[in-house]
Amino acid sequence: SQTIHQWPATLVQPVGSPLSLECTVEGTSNPNLYWYRQAAGRGLQLLFYSVGIGQISSEVPQNLSASRPQDRQFILSSKKLLLSDSGFYLCAWSRYGGSYGYTFGSGTRLTVV
Amino acid sequence: AQSVTQLDSQVPVFEEAPVELRCNYSSSVSVYLFWYVQYPNQGLQLLLKYLSGSTLVKGINGFEAEFNKSQTSFHLRKPSVHISDTAEYFCAAWTGKLIFGQGTTLQVKP
């Protein structure tokens, strides 16, 4: 069966520090991968998605970037965190373009102080 | 552009009462529709989905939803809620990308 792992679960980082969140999927190949952010009191905002290694599409211009160095690995990064980067970050994967729905990881709670 | 609207931001209900969480979508093309549940500090879990066929879809935890094409709605229902159903519920539509509504907080009171 397929599983998705996301870590760390919680993270407290000072303003201006770098960020690296990792997501890996097991039990499938060539998945579509997604990064979402959920800010307090808001819905889910799609940040990035990837249909293959090295292929990244950005939905919202911001202080973050994403990379996909391996087929089942998706990384969310920042060189310098802002207070506004605080939120709950969710990784997800899908097959066949996503028409059957996405499967989400357990999320990372990021607090920038 | 496609959009998903959840008509209620919060729905308080007493335990064992029925509940309906409302969702409307706008799309000029066929859509696939989903309901997800999110418990505090957790990821999203798929409750049910409508891809085609019967307009009444049954999901996990006793939830069901009805696709109504003429009203462009996909409301989620449960005949009798439990305290453990307290969570955030998201409606979503897929037309190439998965677009989420803003979420509805279901608060089940004893």
Image: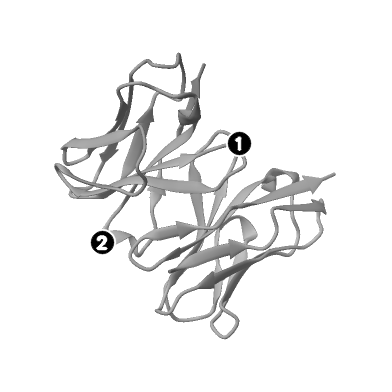
Q: Chain of mark 1?
A: B
**Residue under circle 1?**
B40
> Can I make out residue A1 in this image?
no
In the rendered view, tell whether residue B82 sits above or below residue A76. Answer: below
At 45% from the left and 25% from the top, the residue drawn is A9
In front of the other: B13 or A1:
B13
Corner quadrant of residue B58: bottom right
The numbered dot on residue B23 is: none
In front of the other: B35 or B80:
B35
**Residue under circle 2?**
A96
- Disc 2 marks a residue whose amino acid type is Tyr
Q: Secondary structure at mark 2?
A: helix
At 34% from the left and 39% from the top, the residue drawn is A4
Q: Secondary structure at mark 1?
A: loop
Percent position (x, y) of residue A86? Answer: 49, 28
User: Marks 2/1: CA distance?
Assistant: 29 Å
In the rendered view, tell whether residue A19 sits above or below residue A88. Answer: above
Q: Residues within 10 Å of mark 1 (few under 14, many from 20)?
A: few
- Disc 1 marks a residue whose amino acid type is Pro
Percent position (x, y) of residue B95? Answer: 37, 68
Q: Is residue B28 left or right of residue B58?
A: left
Q: Chain of mark 2?
A: A
Q: Residues within 10 Å of mark 2 (few under 14, many from 20)?
A: few
Percent position (x, y) of residue A63? Answer: 35, 32
Query: Marks 2 and 1: CB-CB under 8 Å?
Result: no
Furthest residue to the bottom?
Answer: B70
Q: Are marks 2 and 1 on the same chain?
A: no
Percent position (x, y) of residue A68? Answer: 20, 38
Q: Is residue B18 left or right of residue B47?
A: right
